[in-house]
């Protein structure tokens, strides 16, 4: 995924110095990020935001922090970018990476919501669809493990240990399939919007139908889990 760099153009002689400085810092941060110097990129993005606050600067800062595995802080910056971005492309990317940060914290339910928000803005994003499916599977595994733990507490110690180990192994295998991160930094302000490919839009009705299908699948999973939870657990008494 290519990083789009804005060429800042002033309309008046001696245009705003603070904006030029912010742009230079943002571009310097992009270069550091591409060199995988994520700490250096973070420092430059922070300085850029001090000069001029932009949603894309917040998004890029979130990326550099995500790469350093500080997921709580990354969540704050992605949320800020998603709330303040004026173009759907940046909003969608911010929600996508917000979902990834929540996924990394194993908050699968909230990551699902973030991915759905991204898909509402870009319904044809294949990476987001893939990550949504991953999060839904992980949520199901998480709920099954919680159910198993509850049943174990109501039954003999170690009685269901083989099943618990099997589910733990399945969870570890699923965790190996990490979500796909939209990592590349984006440029600043309106010029980047012209350069960046626009999402292929579905109609509002088609987008809503897609999300309804996903919600229905999620509802079926929840009902399946609830049915299992409603089954009586084995008695811990010896007869």
Image (cartoon, helix red, strand yellow):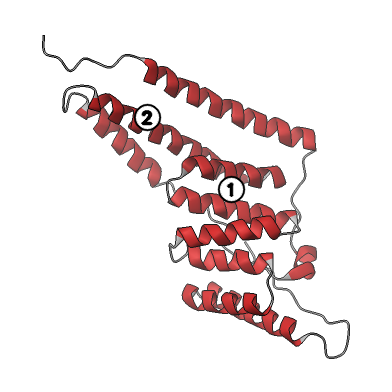
* Rendered location of residue 127, percent (x, y): 58, 48
List the single residue furthest toward the left: 239
* Rendered location of residue 213, percent (x, y): 64, 28
Q: Residue at x 79, y 85 (%)?
A: 16
Left or right of residue 36, residue 53 in this image? right
Give the secondary structure at mark 1.
helix
Residue topped by disc 1:
127
* Rendered location of residue 91, percent (x, y): 68, 55
Q: Residue at x 61, y 51 (%)?
A: 95
Q: Residue at x 53, y 78 (%)?
A: 43
List the single residue furthest toward the bottom: 14
User: Mark 1 or 2 closer to N-term?
Assistant: 1
Q: Which mark is residue 30?
A: none
Q: Nearer the viewer, residue 138 or 231?
A: 231
Left or right of residue 107, residue 214 in this image? right
Left or right of residue 6, residue 217 in this image? left
Give the secondary structure at mark 2.
helix
Q: Nearer the viewer, residue 210 or 20?
A: 20
- In the rendered view, would you say 138 is above or below 43? above
* Rendered location of residue 144, percent (x, y): 37, 29
> Which mark's residue is nearer the viewer, 1 or 2?
2
């Amino acid at each position: 995924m290519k990083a789009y760099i804005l060429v800042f153009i002033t309309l008046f002689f001696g245009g705003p110095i603070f904006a030029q400085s912010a742009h230079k810092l943002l571009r310097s941060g992009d270069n550091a990020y591409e060199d995988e110097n994520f700490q250096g990129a973070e420092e430059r993005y922070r300085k850029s935001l001090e000069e001029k606050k932009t949603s894309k600067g917040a998004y890029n800062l979130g990326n550099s922090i995500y790469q350093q595995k500080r997921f709580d802080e990354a969540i704050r910056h992605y949320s800020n970018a998603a709330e303040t971005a004026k173009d759907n492309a940046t909003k969608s990317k911010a929600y996508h990476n917000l979902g990834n940060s929540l996924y990394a914290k194993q908050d699968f339910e909230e990551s699902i919501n973030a991915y759905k928000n991204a898909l509402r803005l870009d319904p044809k994003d294949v990476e987001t669809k893939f990550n949504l499916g991953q999060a839904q599977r992980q949520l199901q595994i998480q709920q099954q493990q919680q159910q198993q733990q509850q049943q174990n507490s109501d039954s003999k110690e170690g009685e269901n240990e083989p099943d618990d180990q099997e589910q733990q192994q399945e969870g570890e295998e699923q965790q190996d399939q990490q979500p796909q991160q939209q990592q590349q930094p984006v440029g600043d302000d309106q010029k980047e919007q012209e350069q960046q490919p626009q999402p292929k839009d579905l109609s509002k009705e088609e987008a809503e139908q897609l999300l309804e299908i996903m919600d229905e699948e999620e509802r079926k999973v929840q009902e399946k889990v609830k049915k299992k939870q409603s089954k009586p657990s084995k008695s811990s008494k010896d007869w």
